């Protein structure tokens, strides 16, 4: 088992990086949608 600690660490790190990237993209998409909604509301108020 001790021979595989490096491989286990690489696997856990890879999964962590993938999860972090997914979380950031999800957050970015949510922020973009919120900004678009605010801009849409501003445009409606101008009319």
Image (cartoon, rainbow, N blue to C red):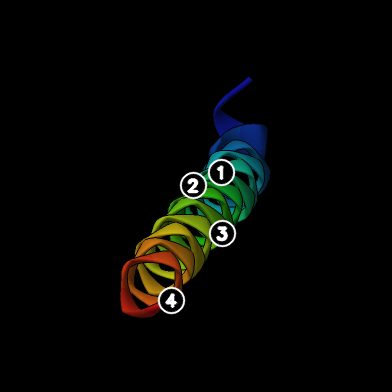
Q: Earlier in the sequence, mark 3 or mark 4?
A: 3
Q: How packed is label 4: few (under 14 Cα within 10 Å), some, or many (20 or more)?
A: few
Q: Earlier in the sequence, mark 4 or mark 2?
A: 2
| Circle 4: element type | loop
Drawn side of residue 29 relative to residue 41, left or right: right
Image quadrant occupied by the N terminus: top right
Drawn side of residue 26 relative to residue 20, left or right: right
- Residue where numbered disc 3 is placed: 29
Residues at marks 3 and 4, CA–CA distance in whole angstroms: 27 Å
Q: Are marks 4 and 1 in contact (CB under 8 Å)?
A: no
Residues at marks 3 and 2, CA–CA distance in whole angstroms: 10 Å
Residue 19 numbered tag: 1
Residue 23 numbered tag: 2
Residues at marks 1 and 2, CA–CA distance in whole angstroms: 6 Å
Q: Nearer the viewer, mark 4 or mark 2?
A: 4
Q: How packed is label 1: few (under 14 Cα within 10 Å), some, or many (20 or more)?
A: few
Q: Are marks 1 and 2 in contact (CB under 8 Å)?
A: yes
Q: Earlier in the sequence, mark 1 or mark 3?
A: 1
**In-front residue for pair 24/7:** 24
Q: Quadrant of residue 38?
A: bottom left
Q: Are marks 3 and 2 in contact (CB under 8 Å)?
A: no
Percent x, y of residue 41: 38, 61
**In-front residue for pair 28/22:** 28
Q: Are marks 4 and 2 in contact (CB under 8 Å)?
A: no
Q: Nearer the viewer, mark 1 or mark 3?
A: 3
Q: Earlier in the sequence, mark 4 or mark 1?
A: 1
Residue at 55 percent across and 28 percent down: it is 2
Percent x, y of residue 15: 62, 42
- Residue where numbered disc 4 is placed: 47
Q: How packed is label 3: few (under 14 Cα within 10 Å), some, or many (20 or more)?
A: few
**In-front residue for pair 11/23:** 23
């Amino acid at each position: 088992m001790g021979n595989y600690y490096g491989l286990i660490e690489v696997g856990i790190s890879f999964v962590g990086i993938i999860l972090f990237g997914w979380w950031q993209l999800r957050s970015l998409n949510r922020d973009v949608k919120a900004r678009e909604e605010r801009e849409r509301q501003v445009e409606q108020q101008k009319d």
